[in-house]
Image: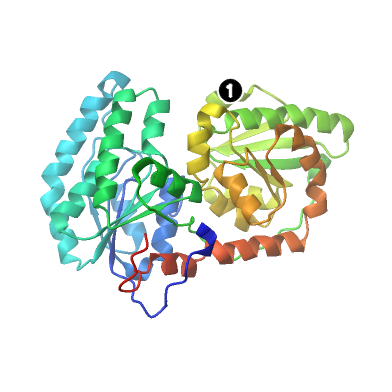
Amino acid sequence: MSPTDLPVVPLDIRLPRYVLLTDAPPLRTGGHGCHVLAWNWLQAMRDQVVLVVTHRLNPTLSLRAIAAGLGVPSAFFPDLCSLRCPRSLRTPKLMLELMLFRAALPQVARRIRASRAERVFALFGGAPWFLSIAGAVAGATGLPLDVYLVDDLEESARQAGQPVLARWTRTRERRLLRSADRVFAISPGYTEHLLAKYGKRAEWLPLPFPTDKVSPHPYRPRDRGVREIAFLGAVNHLYLAPLRDLLRAIPVWNRDNGEDPLRLVVMTYSSPRLVERELGRSEDLEIIHRASDSECRKRLARSWVIFLPYSFEPEHRMMVSTSFPSRLAESLPAGRPLLVYGPAYASLPRYFLENDLPLCVTDPRQLPAALRAIESYDDDALIQRYQAVLDRHHSPAVLRNRLRPAPTGDSSG
């Protein structure tokens, strides 16, 4: 059975009361990645969430501000995010953080029991140590544990040059997934990976969106006719080569279409110096660092096309086939054409192909032709197709339905 054809659970089955346990505090504004994912999940499930358990994570964040913005009760466990240390001391720092968490666990467990929660929903980011925290919370409270995996933790550690951590992660992850009541993953490719790796059947839980509406924004030419190709998100190893491919294609376009030149606009929290070092300085590149959420939305809505790439490099195959870009939640509702670029096995090209969405480039040689085709797809019909996909996979109603417990006697999953 295809992940897109999962059986619909009867709506008369009540959703349980959840504790949201997350290693990235949900942030309405100023966040990225799992901060945004946790926030969107919380909004979709707000009526069912009785407590959020998380930590500060970033020294620039305020626990008081995080708590005030959640709209539901919260409990925080301690960390050492304010303590800067060299790379050689990161492992001792991690061990100390886990000791601090163990000391705080009885108090956290009391808060969870007092909330009358019925399940723990553990939303993972990219931190392997969260495996220990999720398992400890489930053990201390006796509540069923739902696990939501976003990035392959073992592969992330291995690509970061941490083979010992990678081996620890595999052992700890296998143990946690076997004890979990339900396991969810952010992409169909990830569910297939978990089945092959651990023999664990996981369920695809699509990315929750912050809105249930795609608002069309007809393209209006900018001054001097510059057409902006927008990229939103981190500039890291999964996106660098595709961004370089695009920057090589833009001068060719501009030479042949001088009245309608292209420019790549990178909106990122990555260091501008790093971006320039990796991509090079170019008159065809504009870097916007840490723009506000409203500014990012405005730039997406006015762009000519939004670029959503994944690496073609063989060494990144595992990561691009299992992860799923959280920035799709901001990009698709912007009401502009999306240009997806990456191998067919990568999660987002696969998603576009399975949902019969246009402007999906799975061969680098097709990129110039895709740029030429953008105008032919820039119409209301494309926005309607995006809306249909949002309704099918990403609305709060779909999320809640997928989280409903299976009817008694159902042995699936």
Q: Is residue 221 visible?
A: no
Quarter of the image where the C terminus is located: bottom left
Q: In this rendering, is residue 100 above or below 137?
A: above
Disc 1 element: helix
Residue lying at 81% horizontally and 46% vertically, measured from the top left:
373
Q: Is residue 103 visible?
A: yes
In the image, taking residue 317 as reference, residue 85 lies left or right, namely left
Residue most extreme to the bottom: 12
Name the residue beneath numbered marker 1: 278
Q: Find residue 68 and report its image quarter.
A: bottom left
Please state the horizontal and vertical placement of residue 47, each as a whole percent of the image.
35, 71
Residue lying at 58% horizontally and 23% vertically, measured from the top left:
278
Q: Find residue 361 and report its image quarter.
A: top right
Residue lying at 52% horizontally and 41% vertically, measured from the top left:
321
Please state the horizontal and vertical placement of residue 76, each as a whole percent of the image.
23, 50
Please state the horizontal and vertical placement of residue 85, each as a whole percent of the image.
28, 23
Please state the horizontal and vertical placement of residue 20, each as a whole percent of the image.
30, 57
Dot 1 surroundings within 10 Å: few (below 14), some, or many (20 or more)? Answer: some
Which amino acid lies under the numbered mark 1 shown in the image of this protein? Glu
Residue lying at 38% horizontally and 40% vertically, measured from the top left:
197
Q: Choose between 348 and 255: the one closer to the eye.
A: 348
In the image, taking residue 61 as reference, residue 326 lies left or right, namely right
Q: In this rendering, is residue 386 above or below 87?
A: below
